[in-house]
Image: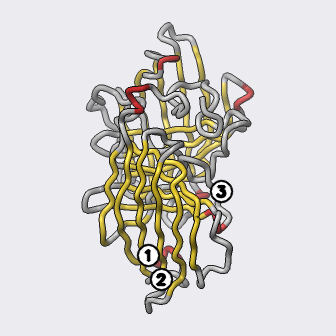
Amino acid sequence: MTAGVAVLAVLSGTPSFADVEPARQAAAMEVKGKAGGVLGKEFGPENEGDPVSFEVDAQGDNPLNPTGDFHVVHRNPDGSLVADFSGRITSLYAIDEVAIVTGTIERADHPGVPLELVGKQISLTVYDGGRKDRIGWVWGFFGAPISRVQGTAPHFPVTWGDFRVRGDAGQEAAAAPSSERVDLKSGATGTNVLAVLGGTSKTPQFFGDPLRFTVAARIAPGDNADQVKGKFHVTHHKPDGSVVADFQGRITCLATGGPVGVATGVVTKSVDAGLVGKPVSFSFKDGRTDRLGWLWGFSATDEPINDCQSITPFYAPDWGGLLVR
Protein backbone atom coordinates (compact mmCIF):
# COMPACT_ATOMS: atom_id res chain seq x y z
CA MET A 1 0.00 0.00 0.00
CA THR A 2 1.24 3.51 -0.72
CA ALA A 3 2.10 5.56 2.35
CA GLY A 4 0.22 8.83 2.14
CA VAL A 5 -2.63 7.61 -0.06
CA ALA A 6 -3.67 4.08 0.68
CA VAL A 7 -4.01 2.98 4.26
CA LEU A 8 -3.87 -0.05 6.51
CA ALA A 9 -5.76 -2.80 4.70
CA VAL A 10 -8.35 -3.57 7.37
CA LEU A 11 -10.87 -3.29 4.57
CA SER A 12 -10.11 -4.11 0.97
CA GLY A 13 -10.76 -1.66 -1.81
CA THR A 14 -8.76 1.33 -0.66
CA PRO A 15 -6.76 2.20 -3.79
CA SER A 16 -3.12 1.14 -3.73
CA PHE A 17 -1.39 3.32 -6.29
CA ALA A 18 2.13 1.98 -5.92
CA ASP A 19 1.30 -1.54 -7.04
CA VAL A 20 -1.34 -0.94 -9.69
CA GLU A 21 -2.13 -4.01 -11.73
CA PRO A 22 -0.95 -3.94 -15.38
CA ALA A 23 -4.51 -3.95 -16.74
CA ARG A 24 -5.31 -0.88 -14.69
CA GLN A 25 -2.17 0.97 -15.67
CA ALA A 26 -3.20 0.68 -19.32
CA ALA A 27 -6.38 2.68 -18.67
CA ALA A 28 -5.21 6.28 -18.96
CA MET A 29 -6.93 9.09 -17.10
CA GLU A 30 -7.40 12.57 -18.52
CA VAL A 31 -8.98 15.90 -17.61
CA LYS A 32 -9.05 18.65 -20.21
CA GLY A 33 -10.96 21.86 -20.71
CA LYS A 34 -11.59 25.45 -19.77
CA ALA A 35 -14.75 26.72 -18.13
CA GLY A 36 -16.01 29.26 -15.67
CA GLY A 37 -18.81 31.41 -14.39
CA VAL A 38 -19.75 34.12 -11.93
CA LEU A 39 -19.49 33.68 -8.17
CA GLY A 40 -22.76 33.82 -6.28
CA LYS A 41 -23.73 35.27 -2.91
CA GLU A 42 -22.64 32.07 -1.15
CA PHE A 43 -19.03 33.21 -1.73
CA GLY A 44 -19.56 36.35 0.32
CA PRO A 45 -20.36 39.97 -0.59
CA GLU A 46 -16.72 40.70 -1.41
CA ASN A 47 -16.76 38.01 -4.16
CA GLU A 48 -20.36 38.00 -5.37
CA GLY A 49 -20.55 38.81 -9.08
CA ASP A 50 -16.85 38.12 -9.75
CA PRO A 51 -16.07 36.14 -12.94
CA VAL A 52 -13.75 33.14 -12.53
CA SER A 53 -12.22 30.69 -14.98
CA PHE A 54 -10.47 27.34 -14.63
CA GLU A 55 -8.32 25.54 -17.17
CA VAL A 56 -7.04 22.00 -16.62
CA ASP A 57 -4.87 19.83 -18.88
CA ALA A 58 -3.89 16.67 -17.01
CA GLN A 59 -3.23 13.08 -18.00
CA GLY A 60 -1.61 9.97 -16.61
CA ASP A 61 -1.76 6.25 -15.88
CA ASN A 62 -0.50 6.39 -12.29
CA PRO A 63 -2.51 8.74 -10.04
CA LEU A 64 0.64 9.83 -8.22
CA ASN A 65 2.71 10.50 -11.34
CA PRO A 66 0.59 12.50 -13.83
CA THR A 67 1.63 15.23 -16.21
CA GLY A 68 -0.11 18.49 -16.96
CA ASP A 69 -0.95 21.91 -15.63
CA PHE A 70 -3.74 24.16 -14.39
CA HIS A 71 -4.61 27.85 -14.73
CA VAL A 72 -7.06 29.84 -12.58
CA VAL A 73 -8.18 33.45 -13.08
CA HIS A 74 -10.38 35.51 -10.72
CA ARG A 75 -11.42 39.06 -11.67
CA ASN A 76 -13.63 41.79 -10.27
CA PRO A 77 -16.82 42.66 -12.17
CA ASP A 78 -15.01 45.66 -13.72
CA GLY A 79 -12.34 43.34 -15.15
CA SER A 80 -9.57 44.25 -12.72
CA LEU A 81 -7.50 41.31 -11.54
CA VAL A 82 -7.97 39.58 -8.17
CA ALA A 83 -5.69 36.60 -8.86
CA ASP A 84 -4.17 34.78 -11.83
CA PHE A 85 -2.16 31.67 -11.01
CA SER A 86 -1.00 28.49 -12.69
CA GLY A 87 1.15 25.46 -11.97
CA ARG A 88 1.79 21.77 -12.43
CA ILE A 89 -0.44 18.82 -11.61
CA THR A 90 0.85 16.57 -8.81
CA SER A 91 -1.90 13.91 -8.62
CA LEU A 92 -4.81 12.83 -10.80
CA TYR A 93 -7.51 10.26 -10.13
CA ALA A 94 -10.39 10.03 -12.62
CA ILE A 95 -13.22 7.49 -12.61
CA ASP A 96 -16.10 7.77 -15.08
CA GLU A 97 -17.04 11.47 -15.21
CA VAL A 98 -15.44 12.59 -11.92
CA ALA A 99 -11.80 13.57 -11.39
CA ILE A 100 -9.73 15.03 -8.58
CA VAL A 101 -6.45 16.75 -9.36
CA THR A 102 -3.99 18.39 -7.02
CA GLY A 103 -1.22 20.74 -8.00
CA THR A 104 1.47 23.20 -6.97
CA ILE A 105 1.30 26.88 -7.91
CA GLU A 106 4.41 27.93 -9.86
CA ARG A 107 3.39 31.37 -11.17
CA ALA A 108 1.03 33.93 -9.67
CA ASP A 109 -0.14 37.51 -10.06
CA HIS A 110 -2.52 38.35 -7.21
CA PRO A 111 -3.09 42.02 -6.43
CA GLY A 112 -6.35 41.16 -4.67
CA VAL A 113 -4.94 38.37 -2.48
CA PRO A 114 -2.36 39.62 0.09
CA LEU A 115 -0.83 36.19 0.60
CA GLU A 116 2.03 34.18 -0.88
CA LEU A 117 0.68 31.87 -3.59
CA VAL A 118 3.76 30.43 -5.31
CA GLY A 119 4.65 27.03 -3.88
CA LYS A 120 1.22 26.49 -2.32
CA GLN A 121 -0.92 23.42 -3.03
CA ILE A 122 -4.38 23.42 -4.63
CA SER A 123 -7.06 20.79 -5.25
CA LEU A 124 -9.69 20.77 -8.00
CA THR A 125 -12.65 18.40 -8.32
CA VAL A 126 -14.06 18.25 -11.85
CA TYR A 127 -17.45 16.80 -12.80
CA ASP A 128 -18.07 16.25 -16.50
CA GLY A 129 -21.86 16.52 -16.65
CA GLY A 130 -22.23 17.19 -20.37
CA ARG A 131 -23.98 20.54 -20.43
CA LYS A 132 -23.98 20.67 -16.63
CA ASP A 133 -20.27 20.61 -15.75
CA ARG A 134 -19.16 21.55 -12.26
CA ILE A 135 -15.93 22.23 -10.39
CA GLY A 136 -14.89 22.47 -6.76
CA TRP A 137 -11.70 23.79 -5.25
CA VAL A 138 -9.55 23.89 -2.12
CA TRP A 139 -6.84 26.58 -1.84
CA GLY A 140 -3.79 25.81 0.25
CA PHE A 141 -2.78 29.49 0.29
CA PHE A 142 -5.78 30.20 2.52
CA GLY A 143 -4.53 27.62 5.00
CA ALA A 144 -6.68 24.71 3.84
CA PRO A 145 -4.92 21.33 4.05
CA ILE A 146 -4.22 19.52 0.76
CA SER A 147 -3.48 15.80 0.44
CA ARG A 148 -2.82 14.02 -2.83
CA VAL A 149 -5.92 12.67 -4.65
CA GLN A 150 -8.21 14.29 -2.10
CA GLY A 151 -10.74 16.97 -3.01
CA THR A 152 -14.05 18.44 -1.98
CA ALA A 153 -17.41 18.31 -3.80
CA PRO A 154 -17.77 20.13 -7.16
CA HIS A 155 -19.83 22.90 -5.60
CA PHE A 156 -19.62 25.43 -8.47
CA PRO A 157 -21.77 25.00 -11.63
CA VAL A 158 -19.94 26.52 -14.59
CA THR A 159 -21.97 28.58 -17.06
CA TRP A 160 -19.58 28.63 -20.01
CA GLY A 161 -16.90 26.37 -21.44
CA ASP A 162 -16.52 22.62 -21.14
CA PHE A 163 -14.60 20.03 -19.13
CA ARG A 164 -13.88 16.55 -20.45
CA VAL A 165 -13.04 13.78 -18.00
CA ARG A 166 -11.84 10.40 -19.17
CA GLY A 167 -11.41 7.96 -16.32
CA ASP A 168 -10.64 4.28 -15.91
CA ALA A 169 -13.33 1.73 -15.14
CA GLY A 170 -12.76 1.85 -11.40
CA GLN A 171 -10.67 -0.47 -9.29
CA GLU A 172 -13.74 -2.13 -7.82
CA ALA A 173 -16.14 -2.00 -10.78
CA ALA A 174 -18.96 -4.50 -10.50
CA ALA A 175 -20.58 -6.35 -13.37
CA ALA A 176 -23.91 -4.55 -13.02
CA PRO A 177 -25.61 -3.09 -9.94
CA SER A 178 -29.00 -4.53 -9.08
CA SER A 179 -32.17 -2.50 -9.45
CA GLU A 180 -32.43 -2.18 -5.65
CA ARG A 181 -32.52 1.51 -4.71
CA VAL A 182 -32.41 3.63 -1.59
CA ASP A 183 -34.97 6.31 -0.87
CA LEU A 184 -34.93 9.48 1.18
CA LYS A 185 -37.92 10.11 3.39
CA SER A 186 -40.70 11.96 1.63
CA GLY A 187 -40.33 15.70 1.96
CA ALA A 188 -36.65 15.61 3.01
CA THR A 189 -35.12 19.08 2.87
CA GLY A 190 -31.63 20.49 3.14
CA THR A 191 -28.57 18.59 1.94
CA ASN A 192 -28.82 14.81 2.14
CA VAL A 193 -26.64 11.80 1.37
CA LEU A 194 -27.83 8.25 1.85
CA ALA A 195 -25.93 5.11 0.84
CA VAL A 196 -26.88 1.49 1.53
CA LEU A 197 -24.78 -0.71 -0.72
CA GLY A 198 -22.24 -3.46 -0.96
CA GLY A 199 -20.81 -6.32 -2.90
CA THR A 200 -17.65 -8.36 -3.02
CA SER A 201 -14.10 -7.15 -3.11
CA LYS A 202 -12.15 -7.37 -6.36
CA THR A 203 -8.82 -6.63 -4.67
CA PRO A 204 -6.64 -9.79 -4.99
CA GLN A 205 -5.82 -9.91 -1.27
CA PHE A 206 -9.52 -9.99 -0.35
CA PHE A 207 -11.12 -11.20 -3.58
CA GLY A 208 -14.70 -12.37 -3.04
CA ASP A 209 -15.01 -11.01 0.50
CA PRO A 210 -18.44 -9.45 1.23
CA LEU A 211 -18.43 -5.69 1.91
CA ARG A 212 -21.28 -3.54 3.19
CA PHE A 213 -21.53 0.25 3.62
CA THR A 214 -24.25 2.33 5.22
CA VAL A 215 -23.86 6.13 5.32
CA ALA A 216 -26.61 8.61 6.19
CA ALA A 217 -25.94 12.33 6.57
CA ARG A 218 -28.00 15.51 6.49
CA ILE A 219 -27.45 19.25 6.74
CA ALA A 220 -30.61 21.12 7.71
CA PRO A 221 -31.60 24.21 5.67
CA GLY A 222 -29.51 27.17 6.80
CA ASP A 223 -26.84 25.05 8.51
CA ASN A 224 -23.26 24.63 7.29
CA ALA A 225 -21.07 21.65 6.43
CA ASP A 226 -19.83 21.22 10.01
CA GLN A 227 -23.38 21.15 11.40
CA VAL A 228 -24.10 17.85 9.69
CA LYS A 229 -25.95 15.08 11.48
CA GLY A 230 -25.13 11.56 10.37
CA LYS A 231 -23.53 8.19 10.89
CA PHE A 232 -21.80 5.38 9.02
CA HIS A 233 -21.32 1.63 9.43
CA VAL A 234 -18.83 -0.47 7.48
CA THR A 235 -18.40 -4.25 7.55
CA HIS A 236 -15.97 -6.60 5.85
CA HIS A 237 -16.37 -10.36 6.24
CA LYS A 238 -14.74 -13.45 4.84
CA PRO A 239 -16.94 -15.75 2.73
CA ASP A 240 -17.27 -18.05 5.77
CA GLY A 241 -18.73 -15.18 7.80
CA SER A 242 -15.70 -14.40 9.95
CA VAL A 243 -15.16 -10.71 10.61
CA VAL A 244 -12.27 -8.81 9.03
CA ALA A 245 -13.55 -5.35 10.01
CA ASP A 246 -16.69 -3.92 11.56
CA PHE A 247 -16.69 -0.26 12.57
CA GLN A 248 -19.14 2.60 12.82
CA GLY A 249 -19.14 6.25 13.75
CA ARG A 250 -20.47 9.73 13.20
CA ILE A 251 -20.21 12.04 10.20
CA THR A 252 -18.45 15.32 11.02
CA CYS A 253 -18.47 17.19 7.70
CA LEU A 254 -20.53 16.94 4.50
CA ALA A 255 -20.31 18.76 1.17
CA THR A 256 -22.23 18.14 -2.06
CA GLY A 257 -22.21 19.50 -5.59
CA GLY A 258 -24.73 18.20 -8.10
CA PRO A 259 -24.70 14.39 -7.95
CA VAL A 260 -21.34 14.23 -6.13
CA GLY A 261 -20.74 14.39 -2.39
CA VAL A 262 -17.95 13.94 0.15
CA ALA A 263 -18.18 13.25 3.87
CA THR A 264 -15.68 12.83 6.66
CA GLY A 265 -16.20 11.22 10.02
CA VAL A 266 -14.68 9.58 13.08
CA VAL A 267 -14.91 5.99 14.29
CA THR A 268 -16.81 5.67 17.59
CA LYS A 269 -17.23 1.87 17.80
CA SER A 270 -15.24 -1.01 16.35
CA VAL A 271 -14.44 -4.68 16.91
CA ASP A 272 -10.84 -3.43 16.81
CA ALA A 273 -10.70 -0.95 19.70
CA GLY A 274 -7.58 0.60 18.19
CA LEU A 275 -9.67 2.18 15.43
CA VAL A 276 -11.88 4.21 17.77
CA GLY A 277 -11.18 7.91 17.30
CA LYS A 278 -9.61 7.43 13.86
CA PRO A 279 -10.78 9.56 10.90
CA VAL A 280 -12.49 8.23 7.77
CA SER A 281 -13.74 9.77 4.56
CA PHE A 282 -16.32 8.79 1.95
CA SER A 283 -17.14 10.06 -1.53
CA PHE A 284 -20.36 9.50 -3.47
CA LYS A 285 -21.50 9.71 -7.08
CA ASP A 286 -25.22 9.39 -7.72
CA GLY A 287 -25.41 8.52 -11.40
CA ARG A 288 -26.09 5.93 -14.05
CA THR A 289 -23.41 3.94 -12.25
CA ASP A 290 -23.47 4.74 -8.54
CA ARG A 291 -20.01 4.81 -6.99
CA LEU A 292 -18.60 5.06 -3.48
CA GLY A 293 -15.04 5.94 -2.49
CA TRP A 294 -13.29 5.77 0.86
CA LEU A 295 -10.08 6.44 2.74
CA TRP A 296 -9.27 5.18 6.21
CA GLY A 297 -6.96 7.22 8.42
CA PHE A 298 -5.85 4.22 10.43
CA SER A 299 -2.09 4.53 9.89
CA ALA A 300 0.15 7.34 11.12
CA THR A 301 2.20 7.10 7.90
CA ASP A 302 -0.67 8.19 5.66
CA GLU A 303 -1.33 11.72 4.51
CA PRO A 304 -4.05 13.34 6.63
CA ILE A 305 -7.73 12.96 5.87
CA ASN A 306 -9.01 16.51 5.49
CA ASP A 307 -12.43 17.79 6.54
CA CYS A 308 -15.01 17.55 3.74
CA GLN A 309 -12.47 16.00 1.36
CA SER A 310 -12.12 12.49 -0.01
CA ILE A 311 -10.93 10.44 -2.97
CA THR A 312 -12.73 10.10 -6.32
CA PRO A 313 -15.65 7.63 -5.99
CA PHE A 314 -14.34 4.31 -7.38
CA TYR A 315 -16.41 1.38 -6.09
CA ALA A 316 -19.45 0.26 -8.11
CA PRO A 317 -21.67 -1.85 -5.82
CA ASP A 318 -23.14 -5.24 -6.66
CA TRP A 319 -26.32 -4.33 -4.81
CA GLY A 320 -28.01 -1.29 -3.29
CA GLY A 321 -27.26 2.29 -4.24
CA LEU A 322 -26.96 5.83 -3.05
CA LEU A 323 -28.60 9.24 -3.29
CA VAL A 324 -27.06 12.72 -3.19
CA ARG A 325 -29.58 15.54 -2.80
Residue contact at pointers 1 and 2, CB within 8 angstroms: yes
Q: Amino acid at mark 3?
A: Pro
In percent of the image, x 35 and y 57: which residue is there?
Answer: 32
SS of the residue under disc 1: strand
SS of the residue under disc 2: strand
**Which quarter of the rendered picture does the N terminus lie within?**
top right
Q: Mark 1 or mark 2, which has the lower sequence index? A: 1
Image position of 48 with respect to 149: above or below: below
Q: How many marks?
A: 3
On residue 66, which mark appears? none
The image quadrant of residue 270 is: top right
Res 256 visible = no
Image position of 171 with respect to 109: above or below: above
In percent of the image, x 51 and y 76: which residue is there?
Answer: 84
Q: Amino acid at mark 2?
A: Arg
On residue 145, which mark appears? 3
- Along the line of sight, the residue nearer the viewer: 270 or 291: 291
Q: Amino acid at mark 1?
A: Val
Measuring from the top left, give residue 69's x and y in whole percent.
47, 59
Residue contact at pointers 1 and 3, CB within 8 angstroms: no
Res 134 visible = yes
Q: What residue is pinned by disc 2?
A: 75
Q: What residue is pinned by disc 1?
A: 52
